């Protein structure tokens, strides 16, 4: 009954096999091996457009280096109040971009409200050095709250970014979970809507350690090799990441894994709805489910072996949660088991 | 005949198997899994002392975060002129330490001269803010020139560091190669001689991606968790690194792999000595061999399929290399094959 | 009728005379002249305690270097939502502290609420690297809203800081204005209440360019000389700052200038209260007065030669200002003239 | 007999008078006053071309912000081994540029050798992220060794910079001293030779605190306002700098002051040549004179009240200075007195 996080899972067997398969032989290091080049091309096929791909090892690195690549002196990145980049990355985007700052924007269920975004950006008039200058918008898909931006919602935010002449970045730590939910192509969820770059996460969805910054807008690329190196994020044996991506994309493994996680998420949500001792905090669109429950009651479930974590109450929801209550998060990983969901459902029903 | 670098090799089969073995099941993320804890203890056994261990993904990250952990405002790190940290890490130690600088020190064959070290440090009197303040000494073992500091040489440098009240860090990208050469214990090569922390590299010696900052002097630890996180270097599924180290230390795998690489290095050096068309640039102690040859001649060997790279002429050796000549580097990896060495020996003899 | 800002004024004649007086002769540079030493001692007299004093040229520098001096990796500074440091310094405290971040705290009239402060700090549990670690509290006295913390309010915030083991810094850009309002000694407003360091601003109150970081808690000093130098904020001819402070403290000049500015502020507030076309946004305690008025109406005053600026609506006051209205700020400087106040009063009454 | 440094002098009376003259009245802050605008135009007249001018308070700030304005990720600045920016600014250019590094270049008498410059730059091939990317060349005029680049020497270095597509910056801490030596116009010494920007120093030559970054190549300007603000280097009452420059340029004051300092420098050099107890370290071109003398002997002069400092032996001159000897520096400021020179001459002759 472990639903603590999707990064508690290890790796899909196909991923480990790919690592085994590619472990022999000698190959050029630092991103120039044949396998590296092949996988870079594979990304362009997956996204149906010529894109630049940079492998890194953590989602925080991908997000931070995207921030660095678009940074200007006094630069401001616009994100949701609850975005991982501003709330949970220990200051990495700020540090690795050499002093960038976040301007948090509101919006329901961890989705940025386009009107508030435009308003917030307009608070930073060009050339007024006392405040700062707008450099990037970043959205998380699926969001930190388990919700998923619709294609039209993505378009609306991209339009605001474009109007303000700044790029839009998508933190895709759970890209696949959002994709299978929307049942669309990677292209439709990104550049066709105006997204300029994506932190394409595979670690949470079955890999050991495989993240890629995928860049559609090639103007943003100029110094990326140097940005990655000066941050210590260039691996020597990059093919160990490429190998993981090879298996990840093969036979739609990534979509299968994400579909499974989402399906288990839906079952978790059903269990939440069936229980008389909790209520959903908001509707879930993916593999993360949030519920509100009495703290003492929740402790009894934890005591019975369930594993889940409290989640900070989002701004604007203060009145939805009483003093004795708390919001909790359940996450179904790519290896979540039906039997664990059933057992949890049973426990929380009493 | 590929002797370009030791990071052109993939991973030892034992490493991939360990990854396969540990890929199932759920475990706490971010360094708190049982396996992580077990391997941390394993390090204390290997080094015969209680030490703190921090996993990272690249040697540059290990070196840079060590630099950050000891940094002070206006801080100066003392290293050899040819040290990887100052010459080949794209400014990562400077950037990730928030503005640290290197003061390069001379010494033969890429080894810091203790007397010059003391002199250089004394050029930064305490409290004189126009220059900077001494923060750390870093040495590379085995060095970038394939040489190995003797235990007494390590002691001498540690003594200078101690006298000046700054810690000494060892960049152990090729720690195992040095260790088998000296035929001593890890403890004897490090803390017993006064080393305060080590970037313990396993990637070059048979892992995919496994580096650890090993810290003996616990005063240096205070903020390390935050330093690693703010740089984007904390992996979520840290057990993929622990798993590699488990196999690495099992049955002395690491020593076997390094011994093989060194043995192949010795054969390469013999081949160099046997050839009439080149001379050793300096004696090698490990798996890296350096020779001086006519550039046109060297090209003929490259044309026949040999792979090796030119190496910048160290300071002080300008007169040892004529205008038509160049220093070249041969590296034997843990999978270097006797047949390739033989073939190279044949080619360079004609 | 220029009430745009107190930094639109030049310098008091006594300040320029001091510069003339000390312009001759040779003196040690970089802070070690006799005059520098004398003025440092003068600060200890003014504050009735041994304190360390560091001269800088801008308030932003003083605040940022204080931030840097207390910074830790992943560090978080707690300030009010509307604090100058987070809202108007172009990212300098973040940049000059090598990656510090602000956690804004609420509270009425730009004063931090001690309960909210404690709550916000507790959101950063020690050793949880995903968030950050608490490093400093900073309060502004007088505040950006023209209000002044009472001595008890200062004590309450210092207590919260102490309880959480972090220092409290006071941004005293308008220190003198607050002091004369409270009619207390500098000691009573600072270290006797628990303040650890002060950005002591004199520029707004009659100097050309004279700011000092005054540090009571000497544990915070260790690397300050290096912090200032590496930021380019160490002047060579520091005595030009000392000379200004000499005149500033002589015969209570600083208190006279601030008293005048506050008195003119009180008259401005009276004029606001007397007008039927505006209302005070909140009560003023010093030389800054804020009013709410119809935008079109305000424009007519500007057209008649009045100079004042709009001010962003503070969080929580959104419902106090209608769509056609705006908050505006009036600032009385040390050279504000009765006749200008009278003329403004006349204009805004019609 | 104080010849310790030119920043031991205070300010010329004309400078203080200008401060007095402009101290009254209200004026827009932060660089937008009428006086600020007037003085900016004055710079364009002085340099006979449209240039952008940014006031700052220290030479270190001017140099560091120039470095920041041209910085790229992994960026490298090429300067002389003995340049102030790499040797004496406490790491400010590196810190304020967010991680820039210096690649020191050799050359006689503190002047960069154009051939060595080209060689050094070529050591950083484009797109090779392990090393870094070339971003700027900086030269000091007059140099730290009191020598002055001829116009042709400046041209040669600008040509190398241009060929490598990087801008050339001139650290003009002693700009006026070089100018009167070359007896040419500011235009001839800068943009007509290919210089892209100048740190125009006036502090050492009679001002209290007046430095300006003068930019001829407007492509380099884009974010400068933000760069200055985020570093805390934007003064509120900028007219206090403008006022100094107004007097500085009036009636050729700046050239008179520098001519005097150089003339006194020439007399100091003559005194050095006349003495049997020392020899010139190299020929001086400006107000700084360097001599080699026995340390014990030098102490006797210091004991008689002379003030001067030791100077580190430049690379390549190690054999010119015996173990008992030391290089010393004498600096004649704009207020240096004939009688002090005479007295020193007398002392060192015995």
Image (cartoon, coloured by chain):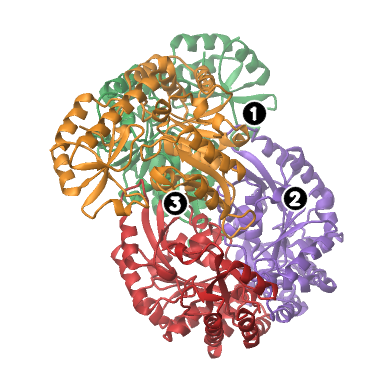
Chain colours: A orange, B green, C red, D purple
Up/down of B279 relative to D277, above or below: above
- Residue B168, percent from left and from top: 40, 46
Q: Which residue is mark 1?
A: B321
Q: Residues within 10 Å of mark 2 (few under 14, many from 20)?
A: few
Of circles 3 and 2, the one toward us is: 2
Q: Could you confirm whether marks 3 and 1 are on the same chain?
A: yes
Front-lying residue, A328 or B159: A328
The image quadrant of residue D292 is bottom right
User: Is B208 or C127 nearer to us in this picture?
Assistant: C127
- What is the C-alpha distance between the residues marked 1 and 2? 45 Å
The residue shown at (32%, 54%) is A318
Q: Is residue D88 left or right of residue D144?
A: left
Residue B234 numbered tag: none
| Mark 2 belongs to chain | D
D147 vs B282: above or below: below
Mark 3 secondary-structure assignment:
loop
Specify whether residue B153 is in view. Answer: no
Cα–Cα gap, marks 3 and 2 = 37 Å
The crowd level at tag 3 (other Cα within 10 Å; few <14, some 14-19, many 20+) is many
Q: Which dot marks residue B71?
A: 3
| Label ID, residue D218 | 2
- Residue B159 position, x and y percent, is 39, 48
């Amino acid at each position: 009954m472990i639903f603590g996080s999707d990064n508690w899972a290890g790796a899909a067997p196909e991923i480990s096999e790919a690592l085994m398969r590619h472990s022999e032989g000698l190959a050029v290091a630092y991103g120039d091996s044949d396998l590296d080049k092949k996988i870079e091309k594979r990304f362009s096929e997956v996204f149906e457009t010529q894109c630049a791909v940079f492998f890194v090892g953590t989602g925080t690195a991908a997000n931070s280096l995207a921030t660095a690549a678009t940074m200007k002196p006094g630069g401001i990145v616009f994100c949701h109040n609850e975005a991982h980049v501003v709330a949970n990355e220990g200051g990495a985007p700020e540090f690795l971009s050499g002093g960038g700052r976040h301007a948090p924007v509101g919006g329901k269920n961890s989705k940025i409200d386009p009107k508030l975004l435009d308003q917030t950006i307009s608070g930073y008039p060009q050339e007024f050095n006392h405040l700062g200058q707008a450099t990037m918008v970043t959205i998380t898909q699926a969001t930190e709250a388990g919700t998923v931006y619709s294609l039209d919602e993505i378009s609306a935010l991209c339009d605001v970014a474009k109007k303000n002449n700044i790029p839009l970045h998508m933190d895709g730590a759970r890209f696949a979970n959002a994709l299978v939910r929307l049942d669309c192509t990677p292209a439709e969820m990104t550049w066709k809507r105006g997204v300029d770059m994506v932190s394409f996460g595979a670690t949470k969805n079955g890999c050991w350690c495989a993240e890629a910054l995928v860049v559609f807008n090639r103007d943003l690329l100029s110094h990326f090799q140097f940005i990655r190196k000066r941050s210590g994020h260039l691996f020597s044996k990059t093919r160990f990441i490429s190998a993981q991506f090879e298996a990840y994309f093969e036979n739609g493994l990534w979509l299968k894994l994400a579909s499974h996680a989402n399906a288990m998420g839906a079952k978790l949500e059903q269990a939440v709805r069936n229980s008389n001792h909790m209520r959903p905090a908001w509707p879930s669109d993916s593999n993360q489910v949030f519920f509100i429950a009495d703290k003492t009651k929740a402790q009894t479930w934890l005591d019975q072996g369930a594993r889940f974590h409290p989640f900070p109450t989002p701004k604007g929801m203060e009145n939805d949660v009483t003093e004795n209550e708390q919001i909790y998060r359940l996450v179904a990983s790519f290896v979540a088991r039906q039997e664990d969901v059933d057992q949890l459902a049973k426990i929380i029903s009493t």
